[in-house]
């Protein structure tokens, strides 16, 4: 396997392990602006800033979703 191929493969696997803020907004059916507000309020899943772009690791998104599970509508 060439170095170039490995680098391309690594970049592809990174893409598969992360969501853009647009992807996450679509997944949760909310606006990108809501995600931006949540980040400024320290709410929502952990995120990365990669070259000025926001990315969310799939495992952080899934952990945040799991933490939101409720058995009833009571607080």
Image: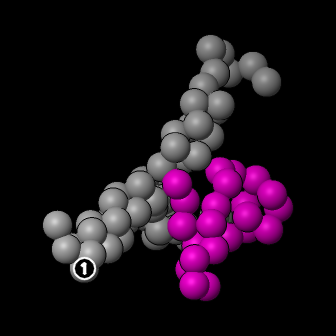
Which residues are drawn in magenta?
A: 36-57
Q: Taking 59 as reference, is 22 above or below it? A: below
At 52% across and 43% down in the image, what residue appears? 59
| Residue 13 picture quarter | bottom left
> Residue 62 location in percent, x, y?
52, 40
Element carrying mark 1: helix
The residue to which callout 1 is attached is 4
- Look at the image and say whether residue 71 sits in the magenta stretch: no
Q: Residues within 10 Å of mark 1 (few under 14, many from 20)?
A: few
Out of 61 and 37, give the one closest to the viewer.
Answer: 61
Q: Residue at x 67, y 70 (%)?
A: 36
Q: Is residue 11 above or below residue 61?
A: below
Q: Is residue 21 left or right of residue 12?
A: right
| Residue 25 vs residue 62, the one in the foreground | 62
Number of numbered markers: 1
In this view of the protein, can residue 33 be seen by the observer? no
Relative to residue 13, is residue 4 depicted above or below? below
Residue furthest toward the top?
71
Q: Quadrant of the C terminus?
A: top right
Q: Is residue 33 left or right of residue 5?
A: right
Residue 20 appears anywhere in the view: yes
Q: Nearer the viewer, residue 50 or 43?
A: 50
Q: Is 35 on the left-hand or right-hand side of 8? A: right
Q: Give residue 3's position: percent from left, percent from top.
A: 27, 75
Question: How far across and how far down the image is residue 58, in percent?
Answer: 48, 49
Q: Quick check: is 55 in the magenta stretch?
A: yes
Query: Which residue is depicted at the point 62% across and 66% down?
Result: 48
């Amino acid at each position: 396997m060439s170095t170039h191929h490995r680098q391309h493969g690594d970049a592809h696997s990174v893409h598969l392990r992360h969501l853009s803020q647009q992807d996450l907004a679509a997944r949760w059916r909310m606006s990108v602006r809501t995600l931006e507000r949540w980040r400024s309020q320290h709410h929502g899943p952990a995120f990365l800033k990669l070259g000025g772009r926001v990315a969310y690791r799939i495992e952080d998104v899934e952990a945040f979703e799991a933490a939101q599970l409720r058995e009833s509508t009571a607080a």
